[in-house]
Image (cartoon, rainbow, N blue to C red):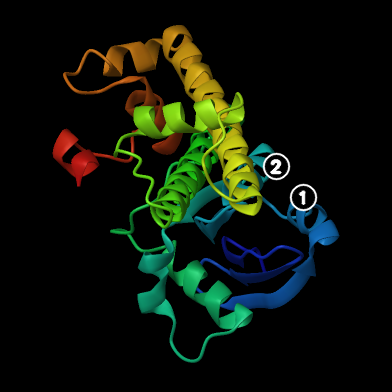
Amino acid sequence: MQVTTIGVDLAKNGFQVHGITATEEVVFNRPLRRAQFLSFFAKLEPCLIGMESCSSAHHWARELTVLGHEVRLIPPMYVKPYVKRGKSDAIDAEAICEAVTRPTMRFVAIKTVEQQSLLSLHRARDLLVRQRTQLINNLRGLVAEFGIFIPRGLVRVIGFAEGITVGEVLDLPEIANEVIHNLCEQLMALHKRVRSYEDRVKQVAREDARVRLLRTIPGVGAVTASAIIASIGDGHQFRNGREFAA
């Protein structure tokens, strides 16, 4: 029996595959180890493969496409209605297999390695910005307990931290000065790293024609434009601008 459609439930080291024929007869529903995954699909005739869009899905989609298969990535929320009973890997793989065949199903475009690389830059920057904000709030709250007020605004907080790191000593006990100095050093290091990521994003914005085109839209800068290019794949999954905006 020739398998025509396969649903794959991805994980870190183990995968569940559910395969059916053109008449929807189940051929297999079995687990695979990571080392077995590609060799298993290399032995099959080209078929339709569905996977939930997750952290590793784009990598495996590219690998399976090279083997000649047609791969479609589905948002996890669109798979849930097809789960018939309690959750398990086998049940999830079966649900994915059913969902990928629906004519009205909507799919996620497979990202290229370059797009994922750019997206990693944005994710790293976002993480550091959140850490910087947490550190700023902690620092402002800490010095406020000693009656020291740091005005709101990144520039003013960075200015305070810079003064501490270059040798300014507050009229506080040694322990407090040591803690504040360490926090300021950490804040300056985070701020420097965020700036380096932003400079890299601007470099990409100058080199990528698509980013330059998006930046002609009023209010769209280098960060937003490059994030769009990294996130949406080729954009062909959207029928119009309204659908993309939604």
- In the image, which disc is placed on residue 67? 2
User: In which image quadrant can residue 27 be found?
Assistant: bottom right
Tell me the distance, in whole angstroms, between the alpha carbons under discs 1 and 2: 6 Å
Residue contact between numbered discs 1 and 2, judged by CB atoms under 8 Å: yes
Q: Position of residue 217 (x, y in %)?
A: 19, 18
| Residue located beneath label 1 in the image | 42
Mark 1: secondary structure = helix
Observer-nearest of 157 and 192: 157
Label 2: few (<14), some or many (≥20) within 10 Å? some
The correct choice, above or below, for 112 with respect to 166 in the image is below
Asked if residue 221 is positioned above or below residue 66 in the image, the reply reads above
Say which of 33 and 143 sits in front. Answer: 143
Q: Quadrant of the N terminus?
A: bottom right
**Residue nearer the viewer, 11 or 43:** 11
Q: Residue at x 41, y 54 (%)?
A: 141
As shown in the figure, which amino acid type bears the numbered disc 1? Ala
